Image (cartoon, grey):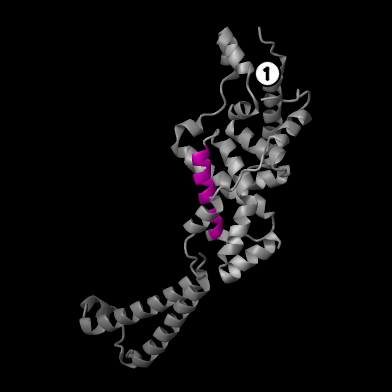
Amino acid sequence: MTDADLIARVLTQDDQNAFAELVRRYQSPVRAFLARMTRGDAHLADDLAQETFVKAWKKLHTYRGGSKFSTWLFGIAVNEFRNVARQRKELALEEIDEVASEENQSAADTRSQLHLDLTEAMKRLHSGERAAVVLCCQNGLTHEEAAQAMDCPLGTVKTNVARGKEKLKRWLLGYHDYEPA
Amino acid sequence: MIMNQPETGDAVEKLLREQNQYVNDDGFTARVVAALPRRRRSWLRQIVLLGAAAIGSILAVQWLPWGSLLSLDSSALLSLSFQVLVPWMTMTVVVISIAWAVVAALQWDE
């Protein structure tokens, strides 16, 4: 059964089983996306994901089918994250200052930085870059779809993806270049 | 964590895709379904509102004293006579209420 079939059943029959099938199909990418956005806070990510799907249930009649259902769903998830980020300072914190960390850190700090894995590197990205990279590079959305989900200009998404990937490349190469003593 | 050495932006993208692992449901779907609110039927609300407006209109035409309204000229307004103002205010309230119900029904979008 296609997404469109399931959506039609939800709208015409209030079929919760059909909606549950939609949740089963998309819970993994939505929860993974929100886990990245909350810098690994799985509990908060799941709360936001649940709220995302409840909002989707309430607003499903406004989904016109002009975009993929996943794109529409990611759009709700992005809004949920933005709403909570306005209230929680630790989520609003943006990218760690690279220059300061490179100039001032001790040897131990250097070792720590070089051991960044992808998860840690993603946490250091600006939230706009992180969202764009996760949506486009991990979930396969086109730049246009990501711009729609993030409700921002196409150029901003392209810039965020390029910058995010460049930073990740630099940080992860640092990890591989590091030779333990 | 063991990683392939990323040499280009595409290698980073490959790494990102490789690490995009499936998140097990672990009861998540059941929790979402349990949290779903009862969906309000907007069409039912529209029908109720339009129906109420129609019935109100019929009753207003049948029962309100349209023919016996005193003329509402400036002297009547200035006199603040209840005999003149109360029927007019009643009519106005009824007409506004009916119009409000119709507009609410037509504009309703959950």
Please name the predominant secondary structure of the magenta segment in the image: helix
Viewer-closest of B29 and A74: B29
Would residue B29 appear left or right of A158 to someone viewing this image? left
Give coordinates of residue B106: x percent, y percent. Answer: 51, 73
Q: Is residue A72 visible?
A: no
Residue A49 belongs to the span the image colors magenta? yes
Would residue A87 appear left or right of A168 to someone viewing this image? left
Disc 1: which residue: A175
Q: Residue at x 45, y 36 (%)?
A: A88
Give coordinates of residue B6: x percent, y percent. Answer: 76, 24
Q: Which stretch appears magenta?
A: A42-57
Residue neighbourhood size for the residue with mark 1, other residues' Cα within 10 Å, grouped as few (<14), some (14–19), many (≥20): many
Image position of A60 with respect to A103: above or below? below
Give coordinates of residue B99: x percent, y percent. Answer: 43, 76
Viewer-closest of B106 and B2: B2
Q: Residue at x 61, y 41 (%)?
A: A32
Viewer-closest of A66 and A26: A26
**Quadrant housing the N terminus of chain A:** bottom right
